[in-house]
Amino acid sequence: MQLDAGWFTEVCEEGGSAFSLKIRRKLHEEQSEYQRIEIFETEKFGKLMTIDGFVMLTDFDSFLYHEMMSHPVLFTHPAPERVVIIGGGDCGTLHEVLKHPDVKLVLQVEIDERVTRIAEEYFPESCASNNDPRVEFLFADGIRWMQQAEAGTADVIIVDSTDPIGPAKGLFTEAFYRECHRVLGESGIVVQQSESPLFHMGIIKLLHRAMRIAGFQQTLSLHFPQVSYPAGWWSATMGGKNLDLQRYRERDISARSFPTRYYNLAIHRASMAMPEFFRHELESA
Amino acid sequence: MQLDAGWFTEVCEEGGSAFSLKIRRKLHEEQSEYQRIEIFETEKFGKLMTIDGFVMLTDFDSFLYHEMMSHPVLFTHPAPERVVIIGGGDCGTLHEVLKHPDVKLVLQVEIDERVTRIAEEYFPESCASNNDPRVEFLFADGIRWMQQAEAGTADVIIVDSTDPIGPAKGLFTEAFYRECHRVLGESGIVVQQSESPLFHMGIIKLLHRAMRIAGFQQTLSLHFPQVSYPAGWWSATMGGKNLDLQRYRERDISARSFPTRYYNLAIHRASMAMPEFFRHELESA
């Protein structure tokens, strides 16, 4: 069948595939300094934010992505007090990070202030902790910020960016990870959203290589479902500086004081399991 | 954007979502006694088979489903010699089952012979083992067959069916699992494809309950990515008869003599991890 105009559709060229959501109405549309931001009310996925026609988040399924971008790294670091988020303008990852009582300071460096302002209006749940006194918002270029940041001032860096095209391209490079490595303390972790293992294995391999060359002794990808992103199956790739990514605070995960919808100890462990094809691809890299 | 006529689209009503594949051409179309079967050549997913407009398999991603419908149950049973497949007409699951040297006999009971004949023509890889002397094909109603089958004659039953609408509806009932329980030997396992945890939690809960009432002491769901099925994230639910589903032949999995593309020991373990929302839903059932 052919969909009528009542659907939002995102085409994934690499997959020769497309994902669509049935739309009730468009709630907002604007061209910011950097990109076109749209908000839709969908039939079954709640609200939807798109940037330049690509799905950013939905009320229905973004908990998967936001939880998996935050809790695994934060429970891997022994004492994550100082967190930097690059991108993350919708504030969903930030909201999860702030659930951790260890965290004393989160600096979020998002290039486009409009993404955050629009999220505050249409995704109040994601933005529910934006007034937490531990948060500092900086609306600036994350790559430039990282180049100028003081060495050894972060425990965890979360790169919650758009795809590696347009403004986010420089976030997937060895030069950027070298700066991240410098900005992390004695030991630390960087995590980067790293696309779908089924469609973007080339990007994931490049990312591992770039992080290793930049000085991270260990790199490791996590996998998780994410319905509204291409293939419905997504990944995040961590780089560990003087830290074993295979060890995490199991007891703290089980005893955590806050609710999650996807993440738990079993899921943490499971997300690191490497499918055969993935293992082969990384070994051949 | 709106897709033109050069795409195959499957709408998922429950999700208010749709998945599309870019098509080069339609290779085959027929109305069998039971359903409408179509074969397409896609841009990036190889060949695609649809039944009544729903994706059945593609060259690109069906290895995920076929491996996860077969290897976890076969490596959980201590000595799976006699396997019954209900449905499975495309023969992809059968092909994986036959990789196990322990297996002495596989009876495949598929209602629609045309699905198998068309698969033989368009999916030669899935059907590569159809001439294995251990296989017997029966083209008949799986529900009726199960009612009439001799007790204690199977070690593993794999229900590789279409969605629980139309002819497959009766495969998701307590009455059917009671027959499966009877047909299994002293100990045994049934596994049923059980839709997407994100869209069909109600079906999964019913399935667990039906299997338990039918006599299976343990039930357990596996999760895995499956791009071309709704939500891109799928499940299979096992019922164990006098068998611990949490124990599997770890050494045999690691030492297996055949290649897989997704499945391995780490993935077996990972597939059983229950997301928080899933655990809550099952506990409330």
Image (cartoon, coloured by chain):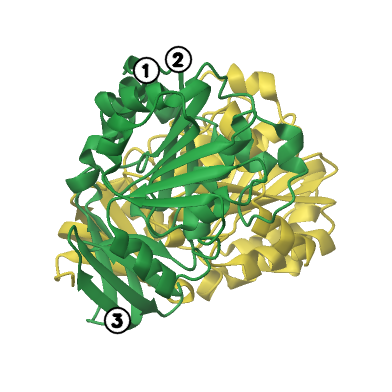
Chain colours: A yellow, B green
Marks 2, 1 in one chain: yes
Q: Earlier in the sequence, mark 3 or mark 1?
A: 3
Side of B51 relative to A25 (left or right)? right
Q: Is residue B15 above or below residue B205?
A: below
- Name the residue tied to disc 3: B26
Residue B212 is tagged as 1
Chain of the residue that carries numbered disc 3 in the rendered image: B
Marks 2 and 1, how far apart at CA: 6 Å
Neighbours of disc 3 within 10 Å: few (<14), some (14-19), many (20+): some
Q: Nearer the viewer, residue A173 or B95?
A: B95
Q: Amino acid at mark 2?
A: Gln
Neighbours of disc 1 within 10 Å: few (<14), some (14-19), many (20+): some
The quarter of the rendered structure image containing the C terminus of chain B is: top left
The reply to whether the C-beta atoms of the residues labelled 2 and 1 are less than 8 Å apart is yes
- Name the residue tied to disc 2: B217
Neighbours of disc 2 within 10 Å: few (<14), some (14-19), many (20+): some
Q: Is residue B285 above or below residue B134?
A: above
Q: Amino acid at mark 1?
A: Arg
Q: Nearer the viewer, residue A281 or A271?
A: A281
**Secondary-structure class at tag 3:** strand
Chain of the residue that carries numbered disc 1 in the rendered image: B
Give coordinates of residue B80: x percent, y percent: 59, 34
Give coordinates of residue A41: x percent, y percent: 20, 53
